[in-house]
Amino acid sequence: MTDFHNRLFSGVQPTGDLHLGNYLGAIRRFAPMQDQFDCIFCVVDMHAITVWQDPKALRQKTREVAAAYIATGVDPKRSIIFNQSQVMQHAELAWVFNCVARIGWMNRMTQFKDKAGKNRENASLGLYAYPSLMAADILLYRGTHVPVGDDQKQHLELTRDIAGKFNNDFKNEIIEEGFEDGDFFPITEPLISGPAMRIMSLRDGSKKMSKSDPSEMSCIALMDDADKIAQKFRKAKTDPEPLPSELEGLEGRPEARNLVEIYAALSNQSSEDVLKEFGGQGFGAFKPALADLAVAHLSPISSEISRMLADPDEIDSILRDGAERAGEIAEETMKHVRQIVGFLS
C-alpha cells in the first residue's frame, strides 16, 4: 500500500486586507489543526498574480498573511509556513497537471466565470488554469486533507479528479516506481470543521463582508486597532427592534442576525445561547458588549501582526525556512513524478 501521511495543506491569497470574515471563516481554525495533522500553510502568491498585482503591495501582503498565521497561533516550528513562489516545484507539477486535466473539466469551474465576468476573453490564462495550480499545491505534498469553504469545494473535486486520472493513466509506471497498489497521489479529503461562517457587511447584512467594499465601516480588518474595532461595531447598521429570544425572530433581519452570529463565533457559543442572554434588549446594550468582546479577542492578534510587520526580516526568515522544508518534500514528490511521466533526469 502507498503510505500517505496525515498531512493537511491550506493556502491564503495575499490580496487585499485580511478581515473578520477570513478569520472566523478559516484562519482561526488553523492553529487547532496542528494537534491532528502534519500541517503546511502556504501564502499563495502565485495564485495572486492571476489578476494584476502591484509588486510592492504583493510583497507586503505576503508578509501580512504570514504574520496573521503566526499571530493566530500557527507555530512555524511545528508547521511549515512559506510563500508558494519560493518553491518552484508548484509550477512544475501544475504544468504536468495541465496536461492531465481536461478542457471540459476546466470549463465547468464556476469561480472562473464569476471572476472573469463578462470580460472572459480578456482574463489571464493563469486565472483559467488556477484550479490546476491549486491541485498541484495540495498534491505536491501528497496532502490527505484540505480545509475548504463553499467557494473551494469544486476546486477540491477537480484535485481529486486529477489525482485519480494521474494514478490511472500512469498505473504501470507508478507500480514500477515502487508504489505497489498503483496509487501515487492520494484522493484528498475535504475537512469541514463546524458550520461554514459567512460574515456579512456591517453596513448591509445582505452582502458578504469584503475588503473591496467602498465603505471602510463595513469591514473589520485584522490590522484594525482596538479603537477602530470598537467604533465600527458601535456604528454597525441595525434596526429599531430589540433582539428576539428565539432564532425565528431574526428572520428578515439580516443585520441583527449578522451581529448575533459574530458574537456567537467570537464567544464560542451558539446563536441560541446569545439570544437567551440578550433577548429583549436593544442594540444600545448589545453593540457595546459585542465591541468589547471583539476588542478583547482581536486586538492581541492585530498587535502581534503589527509587531511582526515592524521587523520584516523576521517574517522573511520564517518564510525562507518554511520554503526550504517545503522544498525538500516537494522535490521528493517531483523526483517520482518526473520518472513516472517519462522525463529524462
Image: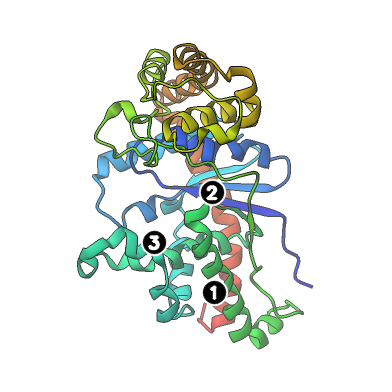
| Label 2–label 3 contact, CB within 8 A | no
Give the residue type at disc 1: Ile
- Mark 1 sits on what residue? 162
Disc 2 or 3, which lies upstream in sequence?
3
Q: How many marks?
A: 3
Alpha carbon distance from label 2 to label 1? 26 Å
- Quarter placement of the N terminus: bottom right
Q: Tell which of 23 and 38 is nearer to you.
A: 23
- Which residue sits at x=54%, y=84%? 342
Q: Residues within 10 Å of mark 1 (few under 14, many from 20)?
A: many
Q: Residues within 10 Å of mark 2 (few under 14, many from 20)?
A: some
Q: Tell which of 338 and 80 is nearer to you.
A: 80
- Which residue sits at x=40%, y=65%? 110
Q: Tell which of 238 and 157 is nearer to you.
A: 238
Counting from the top left corner in percent of width and height, residue 208 is at 39, 41
Give the structural element (helix, strand or loop) at label 3. helix
The image's mark for residue 324 is: 2
| Label 2–label 1 contact, CB within 8 A | no
Alpha carbon distance from label 2 to label 3? 32 Å
Give the residue type at disc 2: Glu
Counting from the top left corner in percent of width and height, residue 312 is at 40, 29
Counting from the top left corner in percent of width and height, residue 216 is at 28, 28
Q: Residues within 10 Å of mark 3 (few under 14, many from 20)?
A: some
Q: Closer to the observer: label 2 or label 1? A: 1
The quarter of the picture where residue 114 lies is bottom left
Say how the picture is coloured. rainbow
Indicate whether 123 appears above or below 49.
below
Counting from the top left corner in percent of width and height, residue 180 is at 76, 79
Give the structural element (helix, strand or loop) at label 1. helix
- Mark 3 sits on what residue? 111
